[in-house]
Amino acid sequence: MLAYPHIDPVALHLGPLSVRWYALAYIAGLLLGWRYAAYWAKTNAFRPTPEDFENFLTWAVLGVVLGGRLGYVLFYQPRFYFSHPLEILMVWHGGMSFHGGCLGVMAAIAGFSLRHKIKALALGDLVAAAAPIGLFFGRIANFINGELYGRVTDVPWAMVFPNGGPEPRHPSQLYQATLEGLVLFIALYFLVRNDKLRARHGFISGAFLVGYGCARMIGEVFREPDAFLGFIGPFTMGQLLSVPMILIGLFLMLRAKDNAAAA
């Protein structure tokens, strides 16, 4: 068994304000993702341009935060939040959903593209290629917070988490950081660097949805289900929400291939 590295969830104390690692993870993911997407935009003969991504950043922030919060409220604890509506605004109490954040960013992409006359799938492809950066930092922040830990196990690298009881558990946050962050980023890198694939608008977006959905399905095998939700049949909520992502992603990839062939 490995010792859990106790790291203060608060990274900085600025007078009365406390800056948590979780907040820094969101900031790092958004800023680095913005720069990464803008870099690839320079190589395109079509929009979005790097300047478009500067304007889109605010939309992305709103999509991630509002979508992530509302997704958690609706997908995970609707009865509680509908009974305590003011709690919805108290994001510092925790509770964000990636699937909700993904929907929020999709809405932001659609709205921004419509307003600025950009092809939504072209914008979405570069956003998708950058998304694993934020996923990686977010899962590392989950690990630092000692939350979203794994199921009880006897593997040699198991850890006893502060809020997970006395049993050793899978450090599933690190598994997910590796699969959803590092592995998915590398896979999408080899796609986004291909000029022909970037021209097949929607292919990289679809590959992200399929890749994330599969990575999440695997990660959930090791992750402890939320205590207030448990299993839904043999599955977790994270697995069930990943199924439509995979199906939509496959549709986008096949549609992009057909469009390229027709051209």
Image (tube, rainbow, N blue to C red):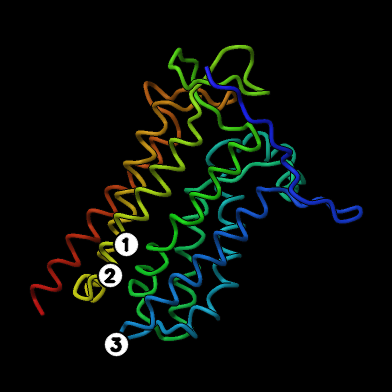
Q: Amino acid at mark 1?
A: Tyr
State the residue in front, 254 or 157.
157
Where is residue 35 drawn, in percent x and y?
A: 50, 72
Residue 193 badge: 2
Classed neighbour count for the residue bearing mark 3: other residues with Cα under 10 Å, few (<14), some (14–19), many (≥20) = few
Tell me the CA gap for discs 1 and 3: 19 Å
Q: Which residue is mark 3?
A: 45
Q: Disc 3 residue type?
A: Ala
Amino acid at dot 2: Arg
> Quick one: quadrant of the C terminus?
bottom left
Marks 1, 3: nearer the viewer: 1
**Spatial CA span between label 3 and label 2:** 14 Å
- Secondary structure category for the residue under label 2: loop
Marks 3/2 in contact by CB < 8 Å: the verdict is: no
Pick the front one: 105 or 50: 50
Whether residues under marks 1 and 2 lie with C-beta atoms below 8 angstroms apart, the answer is: yes
Q: In this view, which residue lies farthest toward the right?
A: 15
Q: Is residue 192 left or right of residue 74?
A: left
Residue 71 drawn at (x, y percent): 55, 48
Residue at x 58% of width, y 36% of height: 143
Task: State the image coordinates of residue 257 (x, y, percent, origin top left).
Answer: 14, 66
Judge left or right: residue 44 versus residue 255.
right
Nearest to N terminus: mark 3 or mark 2:
3
Q: Quadrant of residue 118?
A: bottom left
Dot 3: element? loop
Residue pointed to by mark 1: 189
Disc 3 or disc 2, which is closer to the eye?
Answer: 2
| Percent x, y of residue 65 | 61, 57
Verify CB contact (< 8 Å) between mark 1 and mark 3.
Answer: no
- Residue at image coords 48%, 24%: 170
